Image (cartoon, rainbow, N blue to C red):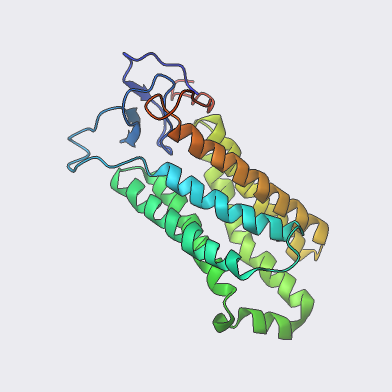
Amino acid sequence: MSTHSTDKNEVHHHESIAMPETAYDGQVRVHNRHITNEPNPKTQPFDPIANPAPLGLAAFATSSLILGLINAGVLVTFPTMAVGITLGYGAIGQLIAGLAEMRLGNTFGATSFISYSCFFFSYGIMLQPASGFLAGAAAGGAQNTEWAVGLFQLPWAIFSLLMFIGTLRQPVVMRVILGQVFLTFFFGMLGGFLMNPVLTKVGGWFSVTLAITAWYGMAAMLYTPENTYFTLPIGIAHTKDE
């Protein structure tokens, strides 16, 4: 977590998901590529809203944990509740967070949350019997099924790599989260294309550690002096001059 003093109200860095300062003094939000403690009337002609990032990270973490345990082989059958969590919390929660980030003018946060919301929507729809994916995969055989899963994860691996590169000046916790997202899709894609269950399990375990890290990021934003007795470090973000 950064170590700025309380009288330094503005820290310049690239647009990112809003993270709290160590010396917390009011809600911290991202506006116009700056972290500020007060809304900017020139760029925010509306009443300020709560930081949506904790909601988005919590939704991401919960769904990633369940899907990760399935891919890792811990859950040997796909429970119906996993589809409910994927659609009901992972997709909707991140969509709400992404729309709120868009309203705050945070392009990076909006793109990230809304895109991964769409992933969970599409994944949940694919697993519905009415979509025809499961029946078509079963009719095509194991090889076609694995190739379909690998192909589905290919563009998400590319997208996650691009998003990870966009975090290189953000706090460490955000780099770790997006890095694990990329590794989850990368190994899942390889496991599908190569029909290698070991690689699929590796991707599943990365999804589990991703969930833990995302929950940590959520807690770091919620644990403020106004809410609890301690805060969590997030790693220092680099300024544009560094």
User: For residue 34, which quarter of the picture?
Assistant: top left
Can residue 159 be seen? no
- Residue 152 visible to an observer of this rendering: yes
Q: Residue at the spot x=72%, y=74% of the render? A: 145
Quarter of image, res 109 = top left
Which residue, as the protein is rendered here, is positioned at the far bottom?
A: 139
Of 123 and 15, the residue lying toward us? 123
60 and 42: which is toward the camera: 60
User: How many numbered discs?
Assistant: 0
Say whether residue 221 is left or right of residue 154.
left
Image check: 149 left or right of 20? right
- Give residue 45's position: percent from left, percent from top: 17, 42
Q: Which one is in front, 116 or 85?
A: 85
Quarter where residue 25 is shown: top left
Find residue 61 and report its horizontal and vertical position in percent: 56, 49
Residue 118 in the image: state x and y as whole percent. Answer: 48, 62
- Residue under the point 66% across and 44% down: 209
Q: Nearer the viewer, residue 151 or 38?
A: 38
Residue 164: x and y in percent read: 56, 42
Up-down relation of residue 4 to residue 46 (above or below): above
Q: Residue at x 43, y 32 (%)?
A: 19
107 left or right, relative to 139: left
